[in-house]
Image (cartoon, grey):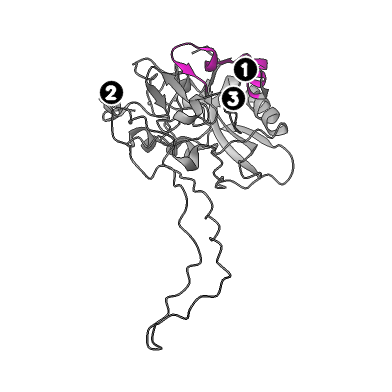
Amino acid sequence: MPNRLPTALTLAAALLAAACVTPPEQEAAQRSTSPPAPPTSQSLTPTAAPTTTPSEPTPPPTSATPPVWVVGATPLPLRPDGFGKVLPTPTVLANRSLPTADRLPPPKSGYKATIDPVPADVLARSTWQPGCPVGKDGLRYLTMSFWGYDGRPHTGEMIVNESAAVGVTHVFAKLYAARFPLEEMRVTARPELDLHPTGDGNNTSAFVCRPTVNATTWSAHAYGLAIDVNPFCNPYIKGDLILPELASSYVDRKNVRPGMVYAGDVVVRAFTEIGWTWGGTWTSPRDIQHFSATGR
């Protein structure tokens, strides 16, 4: 389920699962950018000399082109229900493969995972606060290796329920062995819950202290018992609502692309082995990104 509430709700509070849509993911707190596009080729055909006079200054050559896509940079127009307007997927995101920014040192070799009480500084930048349905001592801070779309290993972070910590590290060990790509894995920050929707987030995350989408009951994410995997590539779908809102291209599950989740694949099998269920089997909403220990 998304990591933000509809803006209609979000103007007061915030949206990742009962239906879950990962923060919708307006995971705009830490943005990833795509690598600069290669320079365009130059014609080798001789051309006439320029007509500039010697006194005219020659502009310095540009060494780089602007980034192709900046996640979270473009707010969407709002729907009456407070979500962003569902728009066609931008061409650059239709076969999404943005690079991963390293926030933690990447693994030197093989899969590595750690399980610890949530450090005070991490808790402070998370969505946890007194009044959440699970106390801070009932949560654990994980670091886990994952493969990025850039073909490089990275280290991600995640907050989960203490009861789920060991099982979750086993799941991501299997994903790492299969080289299943993830774009981001980071702790959702509280300011993200109140951001205007941009519809382009793709953060794989777990704990988000927020209600279920379009409801007032706590989401399984608020207990640290749900994880959204590559939400942009595996959107939440209910009627004409798609979350993230720019992920409409990924509603077509016959167009197989990296990072997508399918029945019987390594992702579904790994979560099934620890007793978690998949929102991709639901009818309405269909929450393809969402896995949970609670069945919701």
Q: Could you tell me which residue is drawn at 69 percent across and 37 percent down?
A: 112
Q: Are marks 3 and 2 in contact (CB under 8 Å)?
A: no
The magenta stretch is 267-288
Q: Is residue 282 left or right of residue 56?
A: right
Residue to which mark 2 is pinned: 81
Q: Could you tell me which residue is drawn at 61 percent across and 25 percent down?
A: 165
- Which quadrant is the N terminus positioned in? top left
Quarter of the image for residue 28 reads top left
Does residue 205 lie above or below 30 as drawn? Answer: above
In this rendered view, identify the residue nearer to me: 205 or 258: 258
Residue 130 part of the magenta segment: no
Residue to which mark 1 is pinned: 263
Residue 107 visible, this angle:
yes
Task: Give the percent coordinates (x, y) of residue 178.
Answer: 71, 31
Q: What distance separates the C-alpha of mark 2 from that of mark 1?
A: 31 Å
Q: Crowdedness of circle 2 by 10 Å Cα count: few (<14), some, many (20+)?
A: few
Q: Could you tell me which residue is drawn at 55 percent across and 75 percent down?
A: 46
Q: What distance separates the C-alpha of mark 3 from that of mark 1?
A: 7 Å
Does residue 225 lie above or below 26 as drawn? Answer: above
Label number found at residue 261: 3
